[in-house]
Amino acid sequence: MRDCVFLLADSNMKGAFEGFLSREVFHRGIGCGPFQFDANEDLVVASGDNDPGLFTRGHELLRPYQNTHQHAIMVLDTAWDGSPGAERIRDKVSANMLESGWERDRFHVVVIDPELEVWIWQQNPHVATALGFESVDGLMADTLLVDAWIRGQAKPKDPKETLEAILKKKRIPRSSAIYKGITSKVSVRQCQDSAFLTMLETLRGWFPEVTL
């Protein structure tokens, strides 16, 4: 069996996960032991379903992988019309996974609150470059960021809306390649989002570091 399948809500998530998990010895950034990863076999995008679709039938999409992958991680945002909130999303999806035959220690549900872009925003040179700035200082001095990113806060108050506004201002087409380019370079240690940190802890539990 393969080690872990990642079911993702959209192509931007795919870009973000592929950027990070395709790094050489990516497991060292997580702080876990090595595990196999191939984007063609281990990344699945719920095309046409997005976050609400994963909420209602993500367990059905993962059912075929019970026999091909030891573990499964499902990732979806909280911010969508009709969302019941992060806790209820996590509880409902987890219950569906159990009912569909996944053992509790074989899967993990990641609910990003409010959305993926909270993982992308960092005061980091690679983020600045990807968004069309020469430096972090230039990025943070932009009028859009000054208004949206309150001093002392880890992220802008509206992560996705702010990112889209910056890209529009810089005339950069929004694409999954931007997410992939950022996550292929930034350090995971700078992301302090609780959902992200819990996912890393889960991977460390599934794939412990090998000590000699």
Image (cartoon, helix red, strand yellow):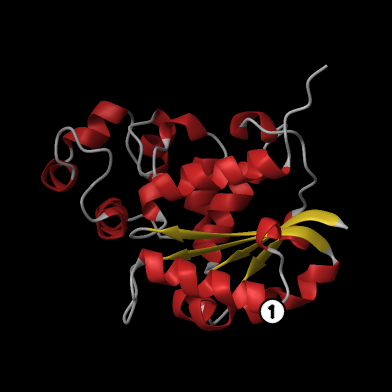
Label 1 secondary element: loop
In depth, the one of 124 and 211 nearer the eye is: 211
Residue wearing tag 1:
100
Image x and y of residue 11, in percent: 54, 65
Residue at image x 80%, y 61%? 69
Residue at image x 29%, y 50%? 170
In depth, the one of 122 and 89 nearer the eye is: 89
Q: Residue furthest right?
A: 1
Q: Residues within 10 Å of mark 1 (few under 14, many from 20)?
A: some
Image x and y of residue 150, in percent: 14, 40
Residue 128 shows up from this direction: yes
Is 102 left or right of 187, judged from the image as shown? Answer: right
Residue at image x 69%, y 79%? 100
The answer to whether 174 is drawn above or below residue 96 in the figure is: above
Image x and y of residue 118, in percent: 36, 50
Is 99 left or right of 166, judged from the image as shown? Answer: right
The answer to whether 71 is drawn above or below residue 62 in the figure is: above
Q: Quadrant of the C terminus?
A: top right
Residue 74: name its quadrant. bottom right
In depth, the one of 41 and 91 nearer the eye is: 91
Three-letter residue code for mark 1: Ser
Q: Quadrant of the N terminus?
A: bottom right
Number of marks drawn: 1
Residue 174: name its quadrant. bottom left
Image x and y of residue 26, in percent: 67, 35
The answer to whether 152 is drawn above or below residue 15 in the figure is: above
Residue at image x 50%, y 34%? 188
Is 200 left or right of 158, judged from the image as shown? Answer: right
Is 6 left or right of 134, judged from the image as shown? Answer: right
Residue 22 shows up from this direction: no
The answer to whether 182 is drawn above or below residue 71 in the figure is: above
